[in-house]
């Protein structure tokens, strides 16, 4: 059965980040993504000269309309939020619009690479902690996990044992299933850990030495899409990690500007087949079937 996802995040017109890959991944998984933009950006913020329009004032009115219409969503998904008021809007959406057995999927975007984003005040970090308390699944990177646990943002797990400790600490504090991203304690590899009622696992993948904006958004959306199709959390995280790695490798082979983001469009059909069926995800097989899509 097709499910509805309410996605609260900024919309960047160019650069394949924020809502753009989220809509694509959830749609590829066979579900309806209903975007509720928190702001519009002409490009993502790593490209100079961007223009923006703040949509905070519209968000409560959209939530009110959806509530009047009786719309309920199998998942309420929130990513980057630009103010405490926007965090409050997400909380309102979760409490009013999430279906009875739905999932509040919170990507607590607050920082990266050991630093809190300049736009995130201590008040906003506190409100984000409060939002995570009503989440069913949280997907912090290691910097954000440290903030959620009141630890030094520059700290991070240095081995698998420490990664498991961080996962259990997050689950104990927030009561949610946890996906911890950005684990890079093993040379040449990067990946994620997850913890659910079925237990915890670590999934590391080959690191490709190139940075592309928007890959975190893509990863989280692929995890959600796989979960909506009945995959276990550990399976969804492993699938998402492999898919994002392959998108990066495919894009690197095209020699495009990294600030233009990853060319997930050419890889989404393989993801669609993997999430809608029990076929193992395999981008190489897909590219052999559809050679016009290029080769890694």
Image (cartoon, rainbow, N blue to C red):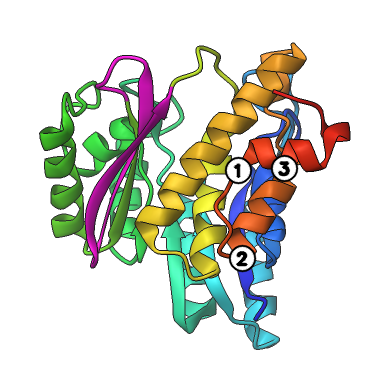
Magenta stretch, main secondary structure class: strand
**Residue on which disc 1 sits:** 282
- The quadrant of the rendering that contains the C terminus is top right
Residue 137 position within the rendered picture, expressed as x and y whole percent measured from the top left: 36, 60
Q: Which residue is at 63% across, 65% downward?
A: 276
**Residue on which disc 3 sits:** 286
183 in magenta: no
In this picture, is 270 found above or below 283?
Answer: below
Residue 22 position within the rendered picture, expressed as x and y whole percent measured from the top left: 64, 49
Residue density around tag 3, few if under 14, some if 14–19, many if 20 or more, within 10 Å:
some
Contact? badges 3 and 1 (CB < 8 Å): yes
How far is mark 2 from mark 3, CA to CA?
14 Å
Q: Which mark is residue 277?
A: 2
Q: Which residue is at 36% across, 22% downward?
A: 189
Quadrant in which residue 177 is drawn: bottom left
In this picture, is 81 found above or below 224?
Answer: above
The one nearer the camera, 53 or 252, is 252
Magenta-colored span: 184-206
Q: Which residue is at 44% across, 20% downward?
A: 207
Badge 3 element: helix
Residue density around tag 1, few if under 14, some if 14–19, many if 20 or more, within 10 Å:
some
Q: Which residue is at 69% across, 63% downward?
A: 33
Left or right of 39: which side holds 204?
left
Q: Which mark is residue 176?
A: none
How far is mark 1 from mark 2, CA to CA?
13 Å
Residue 273 position within the rendered picture, expressed as x and y whole percent measured from the top left: 67, 57
Badge 1 element: loop
The one nearer the camera, 120 or 6, is 6
Answer whether residue 237 is visible to the viewer in this image. yes
Answer whether residue 82 is visible to the viewer in this image. no
Badge 2 element: loop
């Amino acid at each position: 059965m097709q499910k509805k996802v309410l996605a609260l995040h900024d919309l960047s017109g160019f650069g394949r980040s924020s809502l753009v890959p989220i809509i694509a991944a959830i749609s590829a998984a066979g579900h309806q993504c209903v975007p509720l933009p928190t702001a519009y950006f002409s490009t993502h913020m790593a490209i100079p000269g961007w223009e923006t329009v703040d949509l905070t004032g519209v968000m409560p009115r959209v939530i009110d309309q959806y509530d009047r219409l009786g719309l309920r969503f199998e998942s309420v998904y929130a990513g980057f939020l630009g103010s405490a008021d926007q965090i409050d809007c997400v909380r309102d959406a979760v409490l009013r619009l999430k279906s009875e057995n739905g999932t509040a999927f919170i990507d607590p975007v607050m920082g990266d690479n050991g630093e809190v984003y300049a736009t995130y005040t201590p008040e906003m970090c506190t409100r984000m902690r409060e939002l995570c308390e009503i989440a069913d699944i949280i997907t912090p990177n290691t910097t954000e996990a440290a903030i959620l646990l009141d630890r030094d943002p520059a700290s991070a797990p240095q081995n698998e044992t420490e990664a498991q400790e961080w996962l259990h600490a997050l689950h104990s504090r927030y009561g949610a299933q946890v996906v911890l991203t950005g684990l890079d304690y093993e040379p040449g590899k990067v990946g994620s850990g997850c913890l659910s009622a079925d237990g915890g696992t670590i999934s590391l993948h080959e690191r490709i030495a190139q940075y592309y904006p928007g890959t975190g958004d893509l990863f989280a959306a692929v995890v959600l899409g796989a979960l909506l199709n009945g995959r276990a959390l550990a399976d969804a995280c492993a699938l998402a990690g492999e898919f994002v790695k392959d998108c990066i490798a495919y894009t690197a082979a095209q020699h495009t500007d990294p600030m233009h983001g990853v060319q997930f469009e050419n890889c989404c059909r393989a993801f669609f087949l993997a999430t809608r069926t029990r076929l193992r995800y395999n981008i190489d097989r897909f590219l052999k079937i559809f050679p016009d899509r290029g080769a890694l």
